Amino acid sequence: MSTYLVTGGAGFIGSHLCDALLARGDRVICIDNFNDFYDPARKRRNIAAAMASPNFELIAGDIRDDQQLDEVVATYRPDKIAHIAAMASVSYSVHYPKVYADVNVRGTLNVLDAARKNSCKGVVIASTSSIYGRTEKIPFVETDPTDLPLAPYPASKKAAEVLAAAYFNSYGLASTCVRFFNVYGPRGRPDMTPYMFTDAISNGRPITLYDGGQPRRDWTYVADIVAGLVAALETDLGYEILNLGRGQPVLMRDFVTIIEELVDREAQIVHAPLPVSEPTVTYADITKARDLLRYNPQVSVDEGLANLWSWYKEEMRS
Ligand SMILES: NC(=O)c1ccc[n+]([C@@H]2O[C@H](COP(=O)([O-])OP(=O)(O)OC[C@H]3O[C@@H](n4cnc5c(N)ncnc54)[C@H](O)[C@@H]3O)[C@@H](O)[C@H]2O)c1
């Protein structure tokens, strides 16, 4: 039995990670500030099952509070930290850049420093495919350039990866930065396309489709991401950056068709040009994660969207 601190453990991906660790018999300390980027009641629902476990501890706290974070790590002495908390959303970051520096950069620094001071064995850090920016070179490999981000959000994640490298070089603190590609599934964030399109199409509201549905996204089901996260927590690698995607990008128009078939309703499409903050394609080369973590994504987009639709219907009933 290991003890893990999961920052952002009440969010979409973090709550699935908490559930997976608890199911293995691990002890989980979750810290989350339940911010109102989207309805905090949803985050409470995300962790409802975890709360029933004697191995789960919830701390309502903020990673920007370094004193509190140090105390939490010193008290519970986690073997490793899964640092999932962040301000997500590329588009929101364009309007509110400073909070991204505050939470994603300073907050990450606080997590790394608390880990270092308390001799934690390592940190796994949630990073993003948007770090690759707009590039014609596909698939995206971890060694590709990432120094021209399209928005403050990927810039803040780049800073987090670089800080983790500095903590490895200066103090020997191990960390694995995992770049997630377009994660979706039950509990999905309401500001993300899979939830927004499912919600809008099933309720007869219009959706905005960029560039005639030509952009492609490497949709990755949340259970596959969580399997990658668990493997990253279990594997000591020093300092590494790994893509966690599916490696099979899907045209946005085809993505919409799958949702239309599931909800049995035709989408009302409003066409718009691709915003400058959005890449034309995301496409993960997952060779490195396959080699180092035995990462092997299982869930097709058809299956994953069907699961999202089932969960969505349940949510609407509650
Ligand atoms: N969902 C995706 O497709 C995707 C893709 C790439 C990277 N990521 C990264 O994965 C991680 C999780 O994303 P998500 O989609 O689950 O988002 P989410 O917003 O559902 O989860 C983030 C959680 O962190 C918490 N949080 C935010 N600021 C905090 C702070 N200052 N202190 C404590 N807790 C705080 C939030 O309350 C929330 O519960 C993030 O780091 C995000 O950048 C997500």
Image: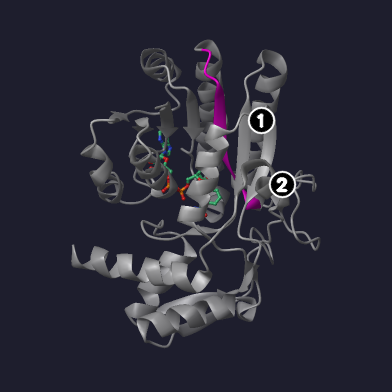
Q: How many marks?
A: 2
The quarter of the rendered structure image containing the N terminus is top left
User: Quarter-wise, where is residue 121 in the image?
Assistant: top right
Establish if 287 lies above or below 106: below
Residue holding disc 1:
237
- Amino acid tagged 2: Lys
Foreground pick, 64 / 77: 77
Q: Is residue 33 magenta?
A: no
Foreground pick, 87 / 309: 309
Magenta-drawn segment: 119-129
x 53%, y 13%: residue: 119
Question: Is residue 101 at least partly visible in the picture?
Answer: no
Foreground pick, 243 / 38: 243
Tell me which colouring the rendered structure shows: one colour
x and y, in percent, of residue 291 in the image = 70, 46
Q: Secondary structure at mark 2?
A: helix
Q: CA distance from mark 2 to mark 1?
A: 12 Å
Magenta stretch prevailing secondary structure = strand
x and y, in percent, of residue 255 in the image = 53, 76
| Circle 2 crowding by C-alpha within 10 Å: few under 14, some 14–19, many from 20 | some
x 47%, y 55%: residue: 222
Question: Is residue 238 at least partly visible in the picture?
Answer: yes
The quarter of the rendered structure image containing the C terminus is bottom left
x 50%, y 34%: residue: 83
x and y, in percent, of residue 236 in the image = 62, 29
Q: Is residue 122 magenta?
A: yes
Q: Are marks 2 and 1 in contact (CB under 8 Å)?
A: no
Residue holding disc 2:
288
- Tell me which numbered mark, 2 or 1, is placed earlier along the sequence: 1
- Amino acid tagged 1: Leu
Foreground pick, 61 / 243: 243
Q: Is mark 2 within 8 Å of ligand 1?
A: no
